[in-house]
Amino acid sequence: MNMKQLLVHGASMLATALGGGAVAREAGGQYVQMAEIEVDPAQLDTYRAAVQEQINTAIRKEPGVLVLYAVSEKDDPTRVKVFEIYRDRKAYEAHLGSDHFKRYKATVEKMVKSLKLVQATPIALGAKSK
């Protein structure tokens, strides 16, 4: 399974666990993107802790955040991909304005060597529940 298949599969599983609404509506106004991040190797553990805290808080506090997954490449753990699905563009913008996201950005500012945001359109999301 390649990285994109893994991200889509994982996102689908989470969306199903959260009620399945995100899976049922393919594009349905959702805002979907991937963040491709390169992290300073000396700060990788600290970065992982920061992104974990940010994701946990966003999922818990923001109803418009449907899916947030952070994974690293097996052969190069400094290359991180974050797969994101929001209810709509407004939910994404609210996420960017949240205190916890601003805190995350300030925390990781010097850890992140590069960041590329790639907007995406869902083609098909599917998952099995356990």
Image (spheres, rainbow, N blue to C red):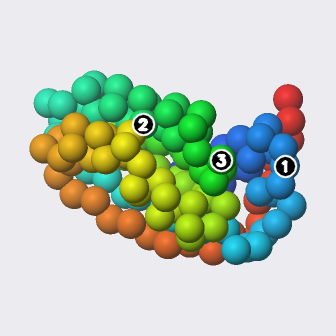
Q: Please state which amino acid type lies under the numbered disc 1.
A: Gly
**What residue is drawn where x is 39% and y is 56%?**
97
Above or below — where is 43 with respect to 73? above
Number of numbered discs present? 3
Q: Please state which amino acid type lies under the numbered disc 2.
A: Gln
Q: Is residue 1 visible?
A: no
**What residue is drawn where x is 31% and y is 53%?**
37
**What residue is drawn where x is 29% and y is 40%?**
103
Q: Is residue 112 visible?
A: yes
Near mark 3 (Cα within 10 A), the count class, few <14, some 14-19 or many ≥20, is few
Near mark 2 (Cα within 10 A), the count class, few <14, some 14-19 or many ≥20, is some
Mark 3–mark 2 Cα distance, whole angstroms, equals 15 Å
Residue 76 lies, in percent from the top left, at 32, 41
Residue 45 lies, in percent from the top left, at 28, 25
Secondary structure of the residue carrying tag 3 is loop
Are circles 3 and 1 on residues that touch, CB within 8 Å?
Answer: no
Mark 3–mark 1 Cα distance, whole angstroms, equals 14 Å
Question: Which residue position is annotated with label 3?
Answer: 63
Q: Earlier in the sequence, mark 2 or mark 1?
A: 1
Horizontal arrangement in the rendering, residue 95 relative to residue 60 (left or right)? left
Mark 2–mark 1 Cα distance, whole angstroms, equals 23 Å
Above or below — where is 87 with respect to 3? below
Foreground mark, 3 or 1? 3
Horizontal arrangement in the rendering, residue 85 relative to residue 106 (left or right)? right
Q: Please state which amino acid type lies under the numbered disc 3.
A: Pro
Residue 5, picture quadrant: bottom right
Question: Which residue position is annotated with label 2?
Answer: 54
Residue 22 lies, in percent from the top left, at 77, 57
Near mark 1 (Cα within 10 A), the count class, few <14, some 14-19 or many ≥20, is some
Question: Which residue position is annotated with label 1?
Answer: 20
